[in-house]
């Protein structure tokens, strides 16, 4: 009986092999994370005693939506109204809501690979017709606007991009995003911009893409820059009223409303994010320099230097690839050195690629983990 059931949802390697599933305590150097270090509750200084654990506003905490709306700018033509912002259980839920709302079996959508797995896997579960644009190391992981334009057909319903990009840290310029907004408007398809790493753009964040046109949907999160992934707080926004109503209906069917506790924590944190974010960005920058220095001394690895986010996606260079037993490398790295990275197969890439999350470990653990990668490669050379 079991094998007769069509399995709509398949667990993704990135989730099965995630550090939280393996047990954080079992990993000494955790270089798999794609967020800033997780905060302890006591360090946030929040006041929660008077919180009533009721059903709450179905769109999400009104005070928080107001603050998020203010962040979309003061230009009334651009600003996203608080009622067009939907708080979700992580950006992951927002992505699920968007895919299941917009796509039916056979609907054409364009998506970038490598990518955060859900951006590909949920449309796949729906059996949408995926047109995948493969980014390449050789072209600097560039998200090519011309390739997107060439892939769009009259059937394309949705184009999905991620900026800053996970796992490569690649960026698009404001002009390139505007070009994609313009081409999707002209060709009559929706545009999803996953902006989960927005505040981690080196040189400052770009405007939310949803401010640019009503066919655009922005997704963002408390997980990455703010180091609060366990809150499960994210949001989506769009100026398109009908589209928003449909997303809102999906949320109400999934969970009625969000968690009163999570949303209050997120609200109070966001009110005083100015106390936290500058230090977070300083720490990220310092850790990026540690990574950069290590990469500079590498004879085994090569990379395209990231332009945003808190992860890099280097690869074993050709000379080393000819000599290495890759399975042995990951075995030694994990079992002998208790060090984990995100192997390429998490992103449907060859295992010569690995995602290194440099924002989560403290400086010493990061240095130790990087040294262990070098050692594990050296010990896995067989030719
Ligand atoms: C690009 C991207 N989008 C969405 C998510 C999901 O984040 P959240 O924790 O907010 O659900 C992630 C998490 O890694 C991500 O990298």
Image (cartoon, rainbow, N blue to C red):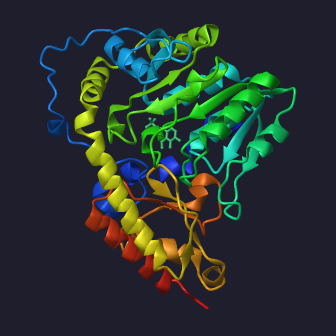
Query: Residue at position x 69%, y 29% from top?
Result: 181
Along the line of sight, which residue is nearer the eye, 78 or 361?
78
Asked whether residue 1 appears in the rendered view, the answer is no
In this rendering, the answer to whether 4 lies above or below 18 is: above
Q: Residue furthest left?
A: 49
Pinpoint residue 260: horizontal percent, then vertical percent: 29, 17
Nearer to me, 80 or 299:
80
User: Residue lying furthest right in this view?
Assistant: 154
- 273 and 102: which is toward the camera: 273
Image coordinates of residue 320 in percent, x first then y, are: 60, 82
Q: Return the residue found at the far bottom.
A: 383
Q: Quadrant of the N terminus?
A: top right
Query: Is any part of residue 95 visible from this angle?
Result: yes
- Look at the image and tell me in which quarter the C terminus lies: bottom right
Residue ID at (56%, 43%): 11
Q: Is residue 217 above or below residue 109?
A: above
In the displayed structure, would residue 83 be above or below residue 322?
A: above
Residue at the image position 44 percent from the left and 68 percent from the top:
292
Quarter-of-image position of residue 186:
top right
Q: Position of residue 278 (x, y in %)?
A: 29, 43
Q: Report x, y in % for residue 73.
A: 46, 22
Q: Quadrant of residue 270?
A: top left
Instruction: Judge left or right: residue 89 versus residue 271.
Output: right
Q: How many marks?
A: 0
């Amino acid at each position: 009986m079991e094998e007769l059931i069509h399995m709509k949802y398949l667990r993704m390697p990135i989730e099965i092999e995630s550090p939280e599933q393996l047990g954080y305590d079992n990993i000494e150097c955790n270089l798999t994370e794609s967020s800033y270090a997780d905060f302890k509750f006591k360090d946030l200084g929040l006041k929660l005693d008077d919180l009533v654990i009721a059903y709450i506003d179905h769109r999400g905490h009104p005070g928080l939506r107001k603050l998020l709306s203010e962040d979309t700018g003061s230009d009334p033509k651009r600003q996203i109204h608080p009622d067009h912002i939907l708080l979700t259980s992580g950006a992951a839920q927002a992505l699920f809501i968007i895919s299941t709302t917009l796509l039916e079996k056979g609907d054409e959508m364009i998506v970038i690979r490598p990518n955060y797995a859900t951006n590909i896997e949920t449309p796949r579960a729906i059996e949408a017709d995926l047109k995948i644009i493969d980014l390449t190391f050789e072209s600097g992981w560039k998200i090519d606007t011309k390739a997107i334009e060439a892939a769009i057909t009259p059937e394309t319903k949705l184009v999905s991009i991620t900026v800053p990009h996970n796992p490569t840290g690649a960026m698009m310029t404001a002009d390139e995003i505007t070009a994609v907004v313009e081409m999707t408007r002209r060709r009559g398809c929706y545009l999803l911009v996953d902006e989960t790493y927005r505040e981690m753009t080196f040189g400052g964040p770009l405007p939310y893409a949803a401010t640019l046109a009503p066919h655009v949907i922005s997704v963002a999160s408390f997980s990455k820059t703010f180091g609060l992934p366990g809150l499960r707080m994210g949001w989506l926004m769009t100026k398109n009223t009908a589209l928003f109503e449909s997303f809102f209906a999906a949320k109400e069917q999934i969970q009625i409303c969000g968690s009163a506790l999570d949303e209050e924590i997120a609200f109070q944190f966001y009110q005083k994010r100015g106390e936290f974010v500058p230090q977070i960005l300083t720490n990220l920058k310092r850790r990026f320099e540690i990574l950069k220095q290590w990469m500079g001394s590498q004879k085994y690895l090569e990379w395209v230097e990231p332009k945003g986010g808190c992860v890099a996606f280097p690869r074993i260079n050709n000379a080393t690839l000819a000599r290495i037993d890759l399975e042995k490398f990951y075995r030694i790295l994990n079992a002998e050195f208790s060090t984990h990275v995100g192997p390429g197969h998490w992103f449907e890439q060859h295992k010569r690629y690995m995602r290194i999350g440099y924002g989560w470990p403290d400086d010493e653990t990061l240095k130790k983990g990087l040294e262990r990668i070098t050692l594990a490669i050296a010990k896995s050379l067989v030719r």
